Image: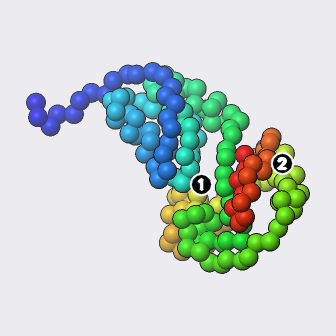
Amino acid sequence: MAGAKSKRRAIDGILIFDKPLGMSSNAALQKVRWLFNAAKGGHTGSLDPLATGVLPLCLGEATKFSQYLLDADKAYVTEARLGMTTATGDAEGDVLEMKPVDVALADVEALLPRFRGEIDQVPPMYSAKKVSGERAHRRARRGEHFELAPAAVTIHELELTEVELPRVRFR
């Protein structure tokens, strides 16, 4: 029967997905659900479309465990460009300001203790956090001004892994 929808199948398990640059976590989930024709699925925390890396995807009965993975400790590797300010606070935004950078490795390392332990972290305006039921990035792209509440996060480890000024890499 042409055009008939195929019935989604019950498939259970956790798939470790290597999310590529430019793909949202939800797009990754929907693609995997489509490939497996899976009836039910969920992801274990959003990775920004600019982020690459491991994204566990839960299918079927495994979605019952996704809440535990959402709250689990995670590790990230990130790179920052010192002296550059963008409209979005990330690499995609228009550059608003460039300042020369003249810091020593010791200067950067001296700042790290301020970011270890429990800290209040304000999400970026261009994030997937919801504000009044709508994603913050959508409101920000329309030029709306709003406040995002800080969230308590715990950073167990923070180390500087590479310095090639003005770029620095952290784990």
The reply, left or right, for residue 83 in relation to residue 134 is right
Q: Which quadrant of the figure contains the N terminus?
A: top left
Disc on res. 116: 2
Residue type of the residue flagged with mark 2: Arg
Above or below — where is 132 with respect to 95?
Answer: above
Element carrying mark 2 = loop
Residue 150, image x, y percentages: 73, 56
**Residue 158 at x, y = what percent?**
79, 46
Q: Which residue is drawn at 64% across and 61% down?
A: 124
Q: Is mark 1 on a helix, strand or loop?
A: loop
Quadrant of residue 164 in the image? bottom right
Which of label 1 and label 2 is nearer to you? 2
Q: Is residue 158 above or below residue 137?
A: above
Q: What is the count of numbered marks? A: 2
User: Which amino acid is tagged 1?
Assistant: Lys
Between discs 1 and 2, the one toward the N terminus: 2
Residue sitting at x 83%, y 48%: 116
Nearer-the-camera pick, 127 or 145: 127
Q: Distance between the residues labelled 1 and 2?
A: 23 Å
Residue 11 x/y as whole percent:
40, 22
Q: Can residue 65 be seen in this view?
A: yes
| Residue lying furthest front | 164
Which residue lies under the disc numbered 1? 129
Q: Which of 75 and 60 is in front in this view?
A: 75
| Residue drawn where x is 72% and y is 46% of the image | 171
Q: Is residue 106 above or below residue 5?
A: below
